[in-house]
Amino acid sequence: MESQNKHTWKTKLHEIIYEADTPAGKLFDVILLIVIIASIVLVMLESVDSIDKNYHNILISSEWIITILFSLEYIARVITVKKPIKYITSFYGIIDLLSTIPMYLSFFFVSSGSFVAFRALRLLRVFRILKLTRYIGASTQFVRALKTSRAKIAVFLSFVIILCIILGTVMYLVESEKGSGFTSIPRSVYWAIVTLTTVGYGDIAPATPLGQFIASIIMIMGYGIIAVPTGIVSSEMTKANRDNVPTNTQSCLNCLASNHRDDSQFCHKCGHELHHD
């Protein structure tokens, strides 16, 4: 009976923490979102010297409260899964840890000489903003589209790199003797990347008519090249929408896999039986 009760409270806690299809799960996600946003605001305010000087104690106290809340959440996530290491070493597990430990590290950086290092470590709390993606449903679909199209994007980026090397070499041959800043092939390739991406810092500029003509062509090409990866990902997202089947936020107790079909009885990743109300 004790084992069964233990399993019941763990299952219920897992459902609240990892899922959003129940009222309790939705409430937990909303509260956590508010706490994450509050924490990010605190990090920003602490970086403003005038605010930190006047409200330092209030900001630190608020941050400690938030850190304790995140610590409790982290512990709860670890104890409610059958394979804690799976969560600890997962992307979100690492993010959760990185966003929690900076305040605890302050105990080891108490001397004045270590204060600068401590301030740098506190900036790790900004990783909490990545926790927001866990609660934005569209982000899952976007990530899935990126994974599906990664081969096409890799081929495209390889082509862009090769093109920049060729264009940079050509510009070096044309401009190297004119004192316009194309002093080496690597520097010329840097210029080609800046120009092709339409950033245009202006620290290097062609001086010859031929160089300016080539630069104009590269600038025009840049507009078309920027649109390619967007089109690839958009195409995959459209395809995913077309093939979409009803899913829920139910998370597997064994492997933490989510996005199961509404009628699923077992995990689509590890085959573990899913819990149902």
Image (cartoon, rainbow, N blue to C red):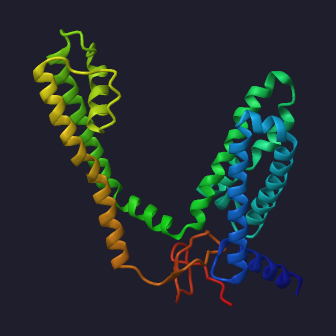
The part of the image, by quadrant, that contains residue 10 is: bottom right
The residue under the point 62% across, 75% down is: 252
Quick check: 188 above or below 195?
above
Locate residue 84, reporting x and y percent.
Answer: 71, 62
Quick check: 81 above or below 121?
below
The part of the image, by quadrant, that contains residue 253 is: bottom right
The part of the image, by quadrant, that contains residue 248 is: bottom right
Viewer-proximal residue, 94 or 185? Answer: 185
Q: On the rendered image, what quadrant is the C terminus found in?
A: bottom right
Q: Residue furthest left?
A: 210
Quick check: 186 above or below 133?
above
Q: Is residue 9 left or right of residue 229?
A: right
Q: Is residue 97 left or right of residue 58?
A: left
Locate residue 158, reporting x and y percent.
Answer: 27, 42
- Residue 181 seen in this snapshot: yes
Viewer-proximal residue, 179 or 170? Answer: 179
Locate residue 170, reporting x and y percent.
Answer: 16, 24
The residue under the point 68% across, 50% down is: 40
Q: On the rendered image, what quadrant is the N terminus found in?
A: bottom right
The residue under the point 76% across, 42% down is: 102
Q: How many discs appear? A: 0
- Residue 90 seen in this snapshot: no
The residue under the point 57% across, 61% down is: 133
Locate residue 179, reporting x and y percent.
Answer: 23, 9
